[in-house]
Structure formats: structure tokens, C-alpha cells
Image (tube, helix red, strand yellow):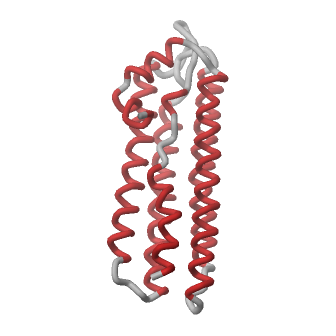
């Protein structure tokens, strides 16, 4: 069914792993969370979020097999987006609660990281509102709407990922770079 194939665009979002492992910072004597603890928590939260999106995406794909009722497809699509929004919120909460890493510019790194992740969550919030407005009476309009919505979410999340990649260039220091490069959870999302 064409509307089901249109969802494939949005499902690409589930493979996005934000490159938090590229963040850098300063050295000893700064207050905050130990860099290795910070890296483990941040990368662990991003990794859990990414794996959750992949699992939800797979569940959505399998749940759409053989479905031709656009209302059912729409309901499952919205449920996927709601799950993505909630998991994004849980990730943001975990990372925000971790606090700034104890490195030079740690507070700025933390602020930019959390702000970017909040933008990722907001992209799902907006997508839910748009998905609820999709037509279920016209298969072509539904398919076109899903494609546009998926493209917009993917574009927004790609922009968030691009911003993270610049954090490593903006805030460079061996302490946080070492912590993230040695953290197994960061290797998983960075690779």
C-alpha cells in the first residue's frame, strides 16, 4: 500500500544516532560531573533512545504489514510518534539531570547539548500535531502528507545532529574527548 511505503521515509529517523561522542571540554579543577560519568550517562541515554526508536520503527513496520485501512495506519503512525516523543523526553531529562561535565566550558557544553536534544523532542511534538491532521479519506493525500512530515522530521533531526558535530570543534579539550572516546556507550553511537 502506498501510504505504508510513505512511512519508510520517517522510519529512517529511527537510525539517527546523535553524535554526542564528539563533544569536548577542558581539564581538572572544574566543578560538575566527572567527565567519565558524564560521558557514560550522556552516551548511554542517547544509545538507549536510538535503540528504542529502532525497536519502535520495527514494531510499526511489522504492525503495518497487510494493513490497508488508512485510519489504522494513521493511528499506528501517531502511536509511533508519541512513543518517539516520550523517549526523547526521557533522554533529555536524564541528560539534563546529569549536570555539566567538570571541564572548561562544561556548563556551555551541557546547555547546548540539552537545547539540541530538546529540539529533537520538539520535532516529534510537531510531527504528532501534523499527523493528527492527515486525511484518512484520500490515500494519495495521506501518502503525500506522511512523506512531507517524514522529510521535515528527518531534516530537523539531521540539523540537530549537525549542531552536535560542531560542539567537538567549538569546545576542544583532551579530558572530555578522552572520556567520550574511551566510553563503550559512546563508541556504539559514534560508530
Front-most of residues 103 and 148? 148
Query: Which residue is drawn at the image coordinates 40% and 24% (left, top)?
Result: 37
Q: Does residue 105 sit above or below 188 in this rendering? A: above
| Residue sitting farthest toward the bottom | 137
Image quadrant where residue 160 sits: top right
Query: Which residue is drawn at the image coordinates 67% and 23% (left, top)?
Result: 170
Position in image of residue 71 (x %, y %): 48, 86
Q: Does residue 61 sit above or below 43 in this rendering? A: below
Image quadrant where residue 186 sits: top left
Front-most of residues 183 and 40? 183
Quadrant housing the C terminus: top left
Query: Which residue is drawn at the image coordinates 41% and 32% (left, top)?
Result: 41
Image quadrant where residue 31 sits: top right
Position in image of residue 30 (x %, y %): 56, 12
Q: Does residue 45 sit above or below 83 in this rendering? A: above
Position in image of residue 164 (x %, y %): 59, 35
Position in image of residue 45 (x %, y %): 42, 40
Front-most of residues 159 and 133? 159
Instruction: Describe residue 118's horizontal placement relative to residue 79 as left or right.
Output: right
Query: Which residue is drawn at the image coordinates 57% and 18% (left, top)?
Result: 25
Amino acid at each position: 500500500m502506498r501510504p505504508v511505503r510513505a512511512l519508510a521515509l520517517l522510519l529512517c529517523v529511527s537510525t539517527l544516532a546523535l553524535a554526542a561522542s564528539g563533544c569536548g571540554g577542558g581539564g581538572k579543577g572544574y566543578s560538575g560531573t566527572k567527565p567519565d560519568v558524564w560521558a557514560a550517562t550522556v552516551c548511554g541515554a542517547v544509545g538507549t533512545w536510538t535503540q528504542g526508536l529502532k525497536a519502535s520503527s520495527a514494531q510499526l513496520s511489522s504492525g503495518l504489514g497487510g494493513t490497508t485501512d488508512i485510519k489504522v495506519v494513521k493511528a499506528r503512525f501517531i502511536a509511533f510518534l508519541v512513543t518517539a516523543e516520550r523517549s526523547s523526553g526521557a533522554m533529555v531529562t536524564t541528560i539534563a539531570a546529569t549536570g555539566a561535565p567538570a571541564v572548561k566550558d562544561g556548563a556551555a557544553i551541557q546547555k547546548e547539548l540539552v537545547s539540541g536534544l530538546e529540539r529533537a523532542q520538539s520535532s516529534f511534538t510537531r510531527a504528532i500535531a501534523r499527523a493528527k491532521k492527515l486525511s484518512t479519506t484520500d490515500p494519495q493525500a495521506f501518502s503525500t502528507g506522511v512523506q512531507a512530515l517524514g522529510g521535515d522530521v528527518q531534516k530537523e533531526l539531521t540539523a540537530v545532529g549537525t549542531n552536535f558535530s560542531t560542539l567537538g570543534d567549538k569546545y576542544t579539550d583532551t579530558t572530555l574527548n578522552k572520556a567520550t572516546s574511551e566510553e563503550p556507550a559512546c563508541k556504539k553511537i559514534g560508530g
